[in-house]
Image (cartoon, rainbow, N blue to C red):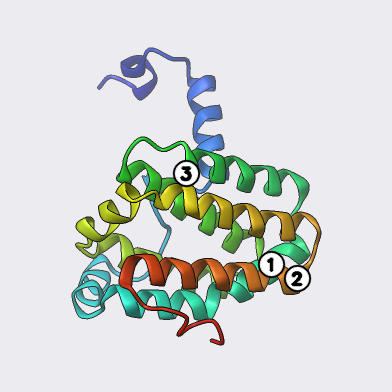
Amino acid sequence: MTSPSVTLGVGRRALREALDTLEREGLVWRRQGQGTFAGSQVTVSDQEISRLAHRVNPLEVIEARLSIEPMLVRRCAMRALQAEIETIVRLADAARLAKDARSYENFDIAFHRKIATCAGNALFLSMFEMIISVREKADWRRVREHYFDHDGAQRSYAEHRRIIDAIIDRDLAKAEAMMRDHLSKVASDVLGVDGLYLDV
């Protein structure tokens, strides 16, 4: 069997370093003895995720995210290391420069996942991963493409920068408020829901 490094035409060390970078940025995860996987690391069965994805709608996903992500970014602002903040900045930049809706979504999820990881709470991270896995599994392609095609990436970048600035300043209350504002604006842009979630 041909090894991945031979197929790709790169050395094993370069391949390991690339995978390390992707893992740090939340784009892949690795499990000893099983391999490297793209997307989120969840312990709930794929079947259960699929069932949930068919039962929920985008509004319910936004409600769930509004319940947990402002709290996660507050803890991220308290605990994130400088190198982790630099990764968050790179992911925001990559989302802004994405060429299509799928690439944008991958970097946007990685941005939010890195914040959740930096919060430093495995249980909260698992809850976040569950929400994102349902979102990824659901067939909302048209919703995502509409958001991207109507300058969603640029609007989100401005909101992401306000979140990042609050994290850099270690301003916990502002980070929380900026995340709530960002997700509320996504609800407004994507779902036409205006101002209902600012006080969640």
From the viewer's perspective, is residue 41 above or below residue 45? above
Q: CA distance from mark 1 to mark 2?
A: 5 Å
Q: CA distance from mark 3 to mark 1?
A: 19 Å
| Marks 3 and 2 close (CB-CB < 8 Å) | no
Residues tagged 1 and 2 counted as in contact (Cβ below 8 A): yes
Q: CA distance from mark 3 to mark 2?
A: 24 Å
Q: Secondary structure at mark 2?
A: helix
Q: Is residue 124 above or below residue 25?
A: below
Name which residue lies at 27% across and 70% down. 49
Question: Is residue 17 in view?
Answer: yes
The residue indicated by pointer 1 is 175
Q: Position of residue 161 (x, y in %)?
A: 63, 52
**Label 1 residue SS:** helix
Is the C-beta separation of discs 3 and 1 under 8 Å? Answer: no
Sequence-earlier tag: 3 or 2: 3
Residue 31 percent location from the top left of the image? 45, 50
* Residue of label 2: 172
Q: In the drawing, what numbered circle is on residue 80? A: none
Vertical relation: 33 (above or below) 134: above
Question: Residue 95 — which label?
Answer: 3
Residue at 47 percent across and 15 percent down: it is: 11
Q: Position of residue 157 (x, y in %)?
A: 53, 50
What amino acid is labelled 2 in the image? Leu
Q: Residue at x 51, y 29 (%)?
A: 18
- Tag 1 or tag 3, which sits nearer the N-term? 3
Say what amino acid the circle numbered 3 marks.
Ala
Task: Give the structural element (helix, strand or loop) at label 3.
Answer: helix
Tell me: residue 14, above or below residue 157: above
- Quarter of the image for residue 63 reads bottom left
